[in-house]
Image: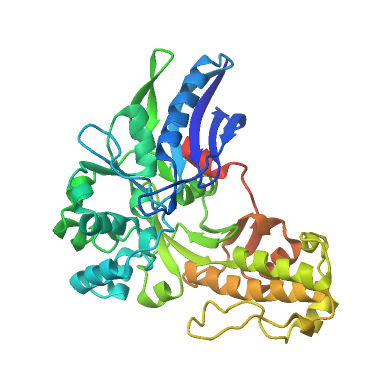
């Protein structure tokens, strides 16, 4: 029988149950996904009842699988999502989608009372993102649905709700609090003033200062249960544990996010305007993050390239780096919006300026790396010389992107370093 640590890894699309052996090797995986349901406004949201049933039933199945002995349990989930419980521990609202539109009148009411958007955003290291600022979801409930709000006894971020299902212990936790929630004043290391004035702090359980919150039963034996972690912060943990020297992590996908867990400076208004924000580690230390929507740009443009040049949708995967092509396209206008000139107008580029798909794709890579370089320097607080930049996710496999990024950052060692199931591994590591 293999001794393991169990992790529930809950993404927006895929839900996973993973078992890692004592060497943190994945030895078992179960994966599923659910159809979304609608909230009271007819907008899509997570099916909380279905998710809850799956968590509990999957655990029962694990107890029956005699190949494995589970020694600890933890959770990692997407952020910006609250579960609101009544006095009996029953959810009183849907699990609202963080992409739900935040009402303009409620936003105006909030900022007229607690300061302008930029000041609040800077204090809380949270760009103004509407429902993605999960603390404001509670404020919205209080004033838009007061009868429902009055039923709430406890508000738990999704990772801590999962932990509560098994340990029956309530807690708040730094990685969820520090995930662009507009809840936490980083300079003062406590909740922002508005949280106390609105009485929201009474709904938030005590903050856990250890990664374990309680225990649950597994085959009649009590095993430790973790607090649960926000996925972006969990993904950093294997790197922090593995490497002693300071580094940056560039996580690539739909969003390309540069994470600096060794940040020393408080986020400035200027950085915030340029889409920087802060996360918190599970120990409560700040992580400076700089975000770009480059994966989305890449997806949209390669779709256009394929249609324009009569190529397959994934033709870009066959394009090899060519210095002569790079020289041909270097002076052409940018194919993507310059995120560092937020006021600049941008129109969709004319692809007739390119003779070949290869030329267009090289230009796209040049533009992406130009912006990515600025993003890395922002997160690195311009003190990057001699550091290592680990790149994981889809673009770590893109040789053109990696070549140009290294050339653009000659004082940094750029390395593709992807950990399989790294987010879940992070949640497992804190249980050791």
Front position in the image: 247 or 284: 284
Q: Is residue 192 left or right of residue 96?
A: left
| Percent x, y of residue 401 | 70, 66
Q: Does 415 sit above or below residue 384?
A: above
Viewport quadrant of the C terminus:
top left
The answer to whether residue 428 is seen in the rendering is yes
Viewport quadrant of the N terminus:
top right
Q: Residue at x 28, y 68 (%)?
A: 107
Residue 310 position by quadrant:
bottom right
| Percent x, y of residue 126 | 36, 64
Front position in the image: 140 or 384: 140
| Percent x, y of residue 380 | 49, 67
The color scheme shown is rainbow
Q: Residue at x 31, y 56 (%)?
A: 137
Q: Does 343 sit above or below residue 81?
A: below
| Percent x, y of residue 389 | 59, 60
The answer to whether residue 380 is seen in the rendering is no
Q: Is residue 81 left or right of residue 358?
A: left
Front position in the image: 19 or 80: 80
């Amino acid at each position: 029988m293999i001794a393991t640590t169990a992790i529930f890894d809950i993404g927006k699309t895929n839900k996973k149950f993973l078992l890692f052996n004592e060497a943190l090797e994945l030895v078992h995986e179960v994966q599923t996904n659910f159809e979304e349901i609608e909230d009271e406004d007819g907008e899509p949201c997570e099916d909380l009842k279905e998710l809850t049933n799956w968590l509990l039933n999957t655990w029962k199945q694990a107890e029956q699988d005699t190949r494995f002995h589970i020694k600890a349990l933890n959770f990692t989930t997407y952020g910006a999502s609250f579960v609101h419980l009544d006095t009996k521990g029953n959810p009183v609202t849907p699990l609202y989608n963080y992409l739900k539109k935040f009402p303009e009148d409620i936003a105006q009411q909030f900022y007229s009372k607690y300061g302008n958007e930029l000041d609040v955003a800077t204090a809380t290291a949270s760009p103004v993102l509407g429902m993605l600022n999960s603390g404001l979801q509670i404020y919205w409930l209080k004033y838009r649905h007061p009868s429902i709000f009055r039923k709430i006894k406890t508000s738990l971020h999704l990772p801590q709700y999962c932990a509560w299902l098994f340990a029956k212990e309530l807690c708040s936790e730094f990685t969820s609090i520090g995930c662009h929630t507009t809840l936490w004043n980083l300079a003062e290391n406590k909740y922002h003033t508005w949280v106390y004035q609105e009485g929201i702090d009474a709904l938030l359980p005590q903050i856990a200062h250890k990664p374990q919150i309680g225990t649950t039963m597994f085959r009649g034996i009590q095993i430790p249960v973790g607090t649960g972690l926000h996925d972006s912060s969990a993904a950093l943990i294997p790197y922090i544990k593995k490497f002693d020297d300071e580094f940056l992590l560039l996580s690539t996908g739909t969003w390309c996010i540069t994470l600096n867990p060794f940040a020393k400076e408080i986020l400035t208004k200027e950085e915030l305007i340029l889409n920087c924000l802060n996360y918190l580690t599970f120990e409560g230390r700040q992580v400076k993050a700089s975000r770009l929507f480059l994966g989305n740009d890449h997806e949209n443009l390669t779709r256009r390239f394929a249609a324009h040049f009569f190529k397959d949708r994934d033709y870009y995967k066959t394009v090899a780096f060519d210095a002569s092509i790079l020289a041909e396209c270097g002076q052409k206008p940018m194919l993507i919006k310059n995120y560092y000139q937020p006021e600049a107008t941008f129109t969709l580029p004319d692809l007739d300026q390119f003779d070949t798909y290869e030329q267009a794709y090289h230009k796209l890579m040049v533009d992406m790396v130009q912006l990515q370089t600025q993003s890395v320097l922002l997160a690195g607080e311009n003190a990057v010389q001699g550091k290592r930049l680990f790149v994981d996710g889809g673009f770590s496999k893109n040789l053109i992107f990696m070549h140009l990024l290294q050339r653009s950052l000659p004082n940094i060692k750029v390395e593709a370093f992807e950990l399989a199931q790294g987010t879940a591994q992070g949640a497992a590591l804190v249980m050791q």
